[in-house]
Amino acid sequence: MKRRKFIALFGGAAATWPLAAVAQTSVLSNHGVSPNVRLGYIWIGAEGSDGDTLRGIRQGLADVGLLDGRTMTFEARYAEGRPERVHGLVEDLLRRNVDILIVPGMVATRAVAQINKTIPIVSVSADPVAAGVAQSLPRPGGNVTGLTVFSGDRFVEKWLSLLKDVTPGLARAGLIYNLSNFTNANMPRIAGAAGQSLNVEVVAAPVSDVTTLPAALAAIDVAKVQGLIVSDDALLLSRRADLIAFAEKTRLQSVYGWREYTEAGGLMSYGTNIFDVWRRAGPYVDKILKGARPADLPIEQPSKFDLMINLKTAKGLGLTIPDKLLAIADEVIE
C-alpha cells in the first residue's frame, strides 16, 4: 500500500544552441510530427534487466510526445554486464546517427562521455561532477546533463541502520558493491565506520562485472554474515534476481539501494525511486531536441527517498518488522 507519494523538487533551464548549430537541430525542433528523431540507449546489463529504468524512460518520452516507431526511433543496446562492451555499443549508435544518447548509471555514463564529446547525453548517475562528465550540477558545461541519484556512499549508513533494526543481535553484515563504479570506492570504509558505531562488522565483497558476482556471493557466504546490503548500482540491479535468490537461499535479512529489488522479493529497499526519476528524463530530451544545450541544462537532484518493505518476504524469514519502520515506510508489500 502506498504510504507517501514521491515528491521531488527539480530545477531546469534551457538555452538556445549557437547559430552554427541551428541547421543541425532544425529538423528536430518539430519532433512532435516528425518520425526522424533517433534516440540511442545503453544499459550496462542484459536486455530485460532494466525494469523501472526503461519503463520510466519510455513513459517520460511519451509524456512529451515521443513514441517509438511513430515520432521517434528508439535504438536500445545492452552491454550484458560487461563494461568493456560499452565502447563498441556507442560506436554502433554513432554510426546510426542518433540525435541523443540516453545512458543510465555512472559506469556507462562515464564510458560514453569519454568516447563521445559531441552528441548530447541524458544520464541518471551518481556523481557526474566527481566523474568528470560535468563541471557543476547547475551548469554542466559539456554534452552531459540529466539527473543525479547520489551515490551509495550517502546511503550505506542508513542501509546498515535498517539492517540492524530488523536483525536482533546483528554482529556481521555483508556488503556487495561495484568496484568498477568509482562512486562506490569509499563505501567499504564508510560502512566499516558505521559498523563500528553499531557494533557490527562489515564484510565487503566487490564486483567488477557480472562474471565476478558468484565469487563475491561465495565470499559473503563463507563469512557467515547475518544480513546483506546491496548497493545502488546499475550493474548489480541488472542481476537482482541472482542477488535476491542468494538472500533467500541463505536466509539473510537484506536491504537494497532501489525499490525494484523489494518489488521482486527482496526484504527492504531505501533510495531513489528510479521510475519517477527516469520519467523526468523525457523533458530533458524534449528541450534538447527543441534546441537547448546540455551544457546549460542543470542536472536535477532528488529531495525525497523511498523506504519499501516486503512483508511477504519477512514472513518467509520468520521475521517481525518493527512497528517504527512500518510507520515510516513509503510502501509495504503485504
Image (cartoon, helix red, strand yellow):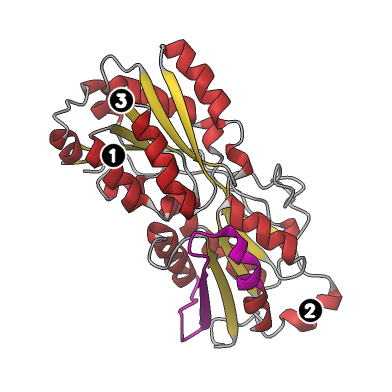
Q: Gap between marks 2 and 1, in whole Å?
A: 53 Å
- Amino acid found under the numbered disc labelled 2: Val
Q: Secondary structure at mark 1?
A: helix
Task: Report the number of discs.
Answer: 3
Coordinates of residue 152 in the picture (x, y in percent): 52, 36
Residue 250, relative to residue 51: is it above or below? above
Residue 152 or residue 67, whichever sits in front: 152
Tell me which label, 3 or 1, sits earlier in the chain.
3
Residue 262 visible somewhere in the drawing: no
Residue 75 lies within the magenta run: yes
Residue that mark 3 sits on: 226
At mark 2, the secondary structure is: helix
Q: Earlier in the sequence, mark 2 or mark 1?
A: 2
Find residue 247 and name its label: 1
Which kind of residue does numbered mark 3 sit on?
Gln
Image quadrant assignment for residue 58: bottom left
- Quarter in which the C terminus is drawn: top left
Q: Which residue is mark 2?
A: 22
Q: Amino acid at mark 1?
A: Ala
Q: Is residue 55 visible?
A: yes
Question: Residue 172, percent across and down?
Answer: 37, 21
Q: What's the CA distance linking mark 3 and mark 1?
A: 10 Å
Q: Is residue 170 left or right of residue 187?
A: left
Q: Nearer the viewer, mark 2 or mark 1?
A: 1
Residue shown at the point (64%, 84%) measured from the top left = 96
Q: Which residues are magenta?
A: 64-90
Q: Residue placed farthest to the right in the image?
A: 20
Residue 320 x %, y % = 17, 25
**Quadrant location of residue 316?**
top left
Label 2 Cα neighbours within 10 Å, binned few <14 / some 14-19 / many ≥20 = few
User: Are the two marked residues, 3 and 1, in contact with CB atoms closer than 8 angstroms?
Assistant: no
* Image height of 134 relative to 73, above or below: above
